[in-house]
Image (tube, coloured by chain):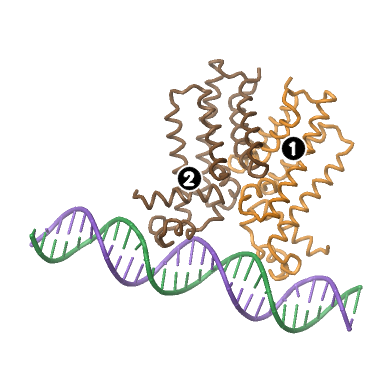
Chain colours: A orange, B brown, C green, D purple
Amino acid sequence: MNNTQEQIVKLGRDFIQTFGYNSFSFKQIADVLNIKNAAIHHYYPTKEDLGLAVIEKDKSDFMALAKALQVASPTEKTNAIINLYRNYYNDGKKLCMISTCGSIFEQLSPKMQSATREHLDTIYSWLEEVFQKGADTKEFHFSETAKEMSTRWIANLPGALITGRIRGREYLENSLNQLSASLNTK
Amino acid sequence: MNNTQEQIVKLGRDFIQTFGYNSFSFKQIADVLNIKNAAIHHYYPTKEDLGLAVIEKDKSDFMALAKALQVASPTEKTNAIINLYRNYYNDGKKLCMISTCGSIFEQLSPKMQSATREHLDTIYSWLEEVFQKGADTKEFHFSETAKEMSTRWIANLPGALITGRIRGREYLENSLNQLSASLNTK
DNA sequence: AATTACTTACTTACTAATAAGTAAGCAATA
DNA sequence: TATTGCTTACTTATTAGTAAGTAAGTAATT
């Protein structure tokens, strides 16, 4: 992957998280990079190809984060996720890929749907494991199951980004604080 | 408002909740109604005009629901909201207007943004009041403030619709059950 | 009761802009 | 010399929006 191709994926991701997959064009990316839209087709023949590459990039970034957190405590791990989402908001009020792809899920191609679903499943399982571990080691104290807690986080985080866009940063922070607090309620 | 105009708003709303504001066209509506796209411009000169009418309709429907629930108990009221969201999912995996507008918020016109924000504020305040009432009458038992609980619900409901689209009905139901349960934790 | 003025609810036929995508070619590099 | 990394120039399709016209109805005037 040369620099141009990397920049294409990076910008594609930025646009998808900011505007949505259906609401950005190859030309927007081309203009920023001072190339022609045909140059993007050179690397990614169809928009779907680019979309899949962006999801793949998001996946691999998450895997890298998970790996970097391998020896971290459950609290450190959940804090890292909270921070990930806080940074999305601070970096141009972006949504996460799950949220933006989910919001037009019915229009995505089967491949994009599968990629999105697999990505979500990965995050979901990872979170569940973290919660279970934290509960086992008495680092967390909550009455739900780890699975339920994962369900809550995975719905609440995207929702907080969306409503945060509408009602502002304070609202997002309130949501994030509540999620942190949810791990120690007993 | 004649029947055609009502149908235009109804279909516009369906399409926005299913595909998103940026991903539906006047032609889609026109084809269903067997009229020409110019006929829609007759009632709604610009797409923004239709978008605003759709948000207005969503608002007035919510107000009507709130009025119908005026003498209902807090539990009945929260159940009605849960059901509202369940019905969105069952009716073609729709998103709520807040969620679909929020997902492309940065691209909406100032008027559309204001309308969305005001709509969200209305729902938010209504929920907060319901939670406060329920806590006061000891019908609900939770440790958060009513405001916090409203924040949680208003982020969790849209998020549950989005992740429900990706992971299926069971996931949505799990989320809705958790929200119901959140009102009686002490 | 008949005419006139005007509105409503559209259609036909178009425009300008933008979208994704393609085919052919060219210059630099390996 | 073959491949890589593009550009030029294009096509086809779709978009929101407009201008002009028409058929049917309604309301006021004669």
Q: Please report the residue visible at 70 percent of the width from the left and 38 percent of the height from the top.
A: A154
Q: Please report the residue visible at 52 percent of the width from the left and 25 percent of the height from the top.
A: B130
**Chain for numbered disc 1:** A
Q: Picture coordinates of residue B164 (x, y %)? A: 64, 41
Q: Which mark is residue A82?
A: 1
Q: Which amino acid type is shown beneath numbered disc 1?
A: Ile
Contact between labelled residues 2 and 1, with CB atoms less than 8 Å apart = no
Q: Picture coordinates of residue A151 (x, y %)? A: 70, 34
Q: Picture coordinates of residue B59 (x, y %)? A: 46, 40
Q: Nearer the viewer, residue B61 or A169?
A: B61
Q: Which amino acid type is shown beneath numbered disc 2?
A: Ile
Q: Is residue A150 above or below residue A37?
A: above
Q: Is residue B21 above or below residue B164?
A: below
Image depth: mark 1 or mark 2 in front: 2
Q: Which mark is residue B55?
A: 2
Q: Is residue B152 above or below residue B74?
A: below
Same chain? Circles 1 and 2: no
- Residue A180: image quadrant is top right
- Residue B60: image quadrant is top left
Q: Are there few (<14), some (14-19), or many (20+) residues within 10 Å of tag 2? A: many
The quadrant in which the N terminus of chain A is found is bottom right
Give left or right: position of B42 versus A107: left
* Alpha carbon distance from label 1 to label 2: 32 Å
